[in-house]
Amino acid sequence: MPDAAPPATHDEFGLVKFHIIAGITWLFVGMLAGTLMGYRLSGAAAAEFLGDIAELSYGRMRMLHTHAVVFGWLSNGFLAFSYYAIPKLTGRRLWMRGLARGNAVFFQVAVVVGAIGLVTGHAEGVEYAEAPWWADIVFALSFVGAVLVNVGTILTSGVKNMYVTLWYLILGFVFTTLNFVMANTIVAHVAPGAAGASIEGLWIHNAVGLWVTPMGVAIIYYLLPVILKRPIASHKLSLLGFWTLAFFYPLGGSHHFFYSPTPWWLQVLAVPLTFTLIFVVYSVVYNFLATMKGRWKEIAKDIPLRWLTFGLINYIITCTQGPFHALLSVQQVIHFTDWVVAHAHLALFGVFSWWVYAFIYWIWPKLTGRAYSRAFAEWHFWLTLVSFWVLYYVADTVAGLMQGMFWLTTLPLQDSIEAALPFWATRAISGVLILAGTICFVISLARKGKPVIDDDTKQPQAQPEVAHVE
Amino acid sequence: MSNEKAVVAEKPMFVLTVAGLGFFLLSFVGMGLGPWLGLELGMEPPEQFVNPYEDDTGEINAVGRGRKVYIREACWHCHSQFVRPVANEEFRYGPVSQAWEYMYDVPNTFGTRRIGPDLAREAGRRSDDWHFAHLWNPRSTVPASIMPKYKWLFTETADGIEPTQDAQDLVAYLQYLGINFKQDVRRQVWPERVVVSGAPVTTPEAGRRGEELFKNYCTGCHGESGNGQGMASPFLKPSAADLTTRYLPREEVFRILFMGSEGSSMPSFSELTEKDLWAISQHVHYMGREVRADALKPANNAQLVARGREVYDRSCKSCHGEGGVVPEIMEKALKPSPKHFRDRVYAPDYVRKVIEQGRPGTTMASFAHLPSEEKDALVAYLASLFDADKYKEKP
């Protein structure tokens, strides 16, 4: 039943805080798995590290890594955001609050069940959806629960003209429910071979494009105007960006299997359909840049704004790369290489994880009534920025380009691996440094800082009553 | 802004149904069902191509079970499984992949990253033993490999290391991958013959390069010193050649490196450059160079050689051929092929050992029953077959 009572700001603070803490826990799981993998790729001796333990083997860590960051970290972060933003934007309390609370815990159970399935050797062969079918069912139930609460609140709120953030949230939730079910039924168990690959392309493409992207964009559409205290520059551009993304993005999935035995017409069609996205994302990016106009120097003192901005810079890079990747001549060289790995990390870590960081830094003082530690937040930022950009992104991009160029020659494959080793070594180091940065992140949040001064009353903000989740 | 339209495009139900449901369905139908239907209609598999993952009764077979292990261990996250028609891949892996090959793969295992080599054309490329050794510890066959070990696919007992059912299934699957193109791959990887004309001048640089390459590519099986006792040796049958027991001219090493030895675990290294192959040849040549003088001594005893020839013609000729030149039919029928004796000479002790014990894993049987005198005669005769004039050695 729609709750007619107007929401109090701190209504869902417990829920939001729970999802944030759970998300950061998963972030550590994902990062540890990633760093372990990165280290093992740094040489023949390193490849043996903990190599006798099946549960920690490279392949299983590979699956745990993406499982933990996509379903654990990012999804928890997005849910924390949506549970905060939706009541704010609709002026209504959450629909079925009890379900939201119970589901917060159930959601973690679902991700744990999937992780157990992966490391104990029950994986299925669909990228990003490797968790076994019994874990898929648990996750789907939990995800549908979250969708019911979030989308249900918007639909029952009676809001007529929604703010941009809500468009993206509806799109992300509804599309991803269908996409997830498609991946774990049709792709995993029905569609054979090249037909399966075409549909798998849709899934892996849209897991990023219609789950992570809309949720992330929803965050920046919400935070940027709030932090800058000025509206988004152009509403028309927001509309254009949203509808073209929703229309074009899903159609480009087959570009993940260029030059494969999938039908050639499908691959050819994927080129323009993917390339169109450059106009889509630039319209969105321009909107943010125009909103930022004249306020750039504020990123020096405002940590959330800084994460948003640097995430936006990465967004521009990654979204410029993407359409060019869909050119067949580029595909010949970069496909199968580390270039793509660097690109994927730029999007999922450099953009969307950073936007979730922005949200967490922004909401945390409200949740706890106390500021985070500025010093540790700076350490978090600089460690992450430098080690990710220099030691990870640039190194992996160069390694990928070298691999692609090597493979065009007739030199043995082994030579391309040896050439990549120094770059893989810096990548492993970046993993350690980013982990160190993330520990600073946690310390920054956990330190009891100064009480936050309420903007309106100029009084210390009252300690909110944090409702406990189970 | 036309207000009317904007309001429609911003209504919750409109966003939900058009963007959320509608565009999903559009992409699924257009980019998912469309190609699926197109493939069903357009694919033309060879008539004899039936589901490789099931036996006649519909039960899952070793190949099918191996595929499950392959997926479970996420092999496909580092090994792609399709050969593209671009980027030199036909040269590197074999014929370009076709849609029908994958028609029984649910889900597909194309993969999106290639850290190790593509596996779509793996069938017939290497021996089962090679794969077992490689899975147990990849460094045992490819010393510079960064692939993880899969020790849990093996049981270690007092008798040695045994592959589990999972490992056997996995290798069955690997040997299935691209089986329809096995002959094409074999022609590419195991050339029938390669004519090697004169080796280049030996240089210290080539020696150093050869040593480095030997370390990176050969020590896993042949051992650091070349004695055949590398890390992979418990798995290999026939065992890796003990390179310290034979004099091999560089041309002969080159030929073996290029062609591999089908039927044994010696793969072809034809992907290495010619220069590098000569460098390895030089290094391997030097490993057994000392053997030459001793090995050729018995050939000076004409009487013994003549006696040896009688024994040879009676017991060895049917496989090794007249005068140590293996007939083509034997070379094709027996894998690994019987050794020919014109281009190599073995240390006497080694010849005696092989006569005594045979060569397990090949068709070379034990001839322990021969009288000792005949064995000595054989040693002398084999040494006399070596073409010492062709392969001169500076003193």
Image (tube, coloured by chain):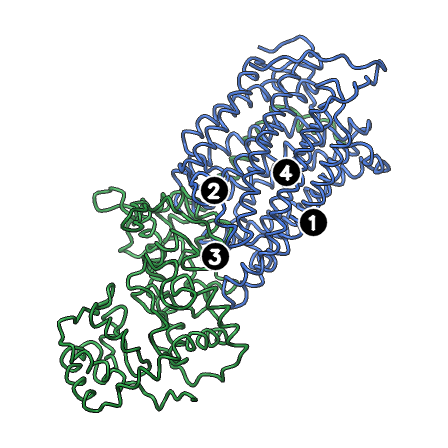
Chain colours: A blue, B green
Q: Which mark is residue B145?
A: 3
The answer to whether residue B385 is above or below residue A267 is below
User: What secondary structure is marked by label 3?
Assistant: loop
Q: Are marks 4 and 2 on the same chain?
A: yes
Distance of mark 4 from mark 2, alpha carbons? 35 Å
Quadrant position of residue A405: bottom right
Question: What is the quadrant of the C terminus of chain A in the image?
Answer: top right
Question: What is the quadrant of the N terminus of chain A in the image?
Answer: top right
Residue B287, given in percent of the width and then of the height, sits at: 41, 75
User: What secondary structure is marked by label 1?
Assistant: helix
Q: Chain of mark 2?
A: A
Identify the residue under disc 1: A390
- Mark 1, Cα crowd under 10 Å, few <14 / some 14-19 / many 20+, is some
In this orientation, does residue B52 appear? Answer: yes
Q: Are marks 2 and 1 on the same chain?
A: yes
Residue at position x 83%, y 18% in the image: A455
Q: Nearer the viewer, mark 1 or mark 4?
A: 4
Distance of mark 1 from mark 4, alpha carbons? 15 Å
Kind of residue at disc 2:
Ile
User: What secondary structure is marked by label 2?
Assistant: helix
Identify the residue under disc 2: A199
Question: Which circle's residue, 4 or 2, is located before the other in the chain?
Answer: 2
User: What secondary structure is marked by label 4?
Assistant: helix
Kind of residue at disc 4:
Leu
Q: Are marks 3 and 4 on the same chain?
A: no
Quadrant position of residue B166: top left
Q: Chain of mark 1?
A: A
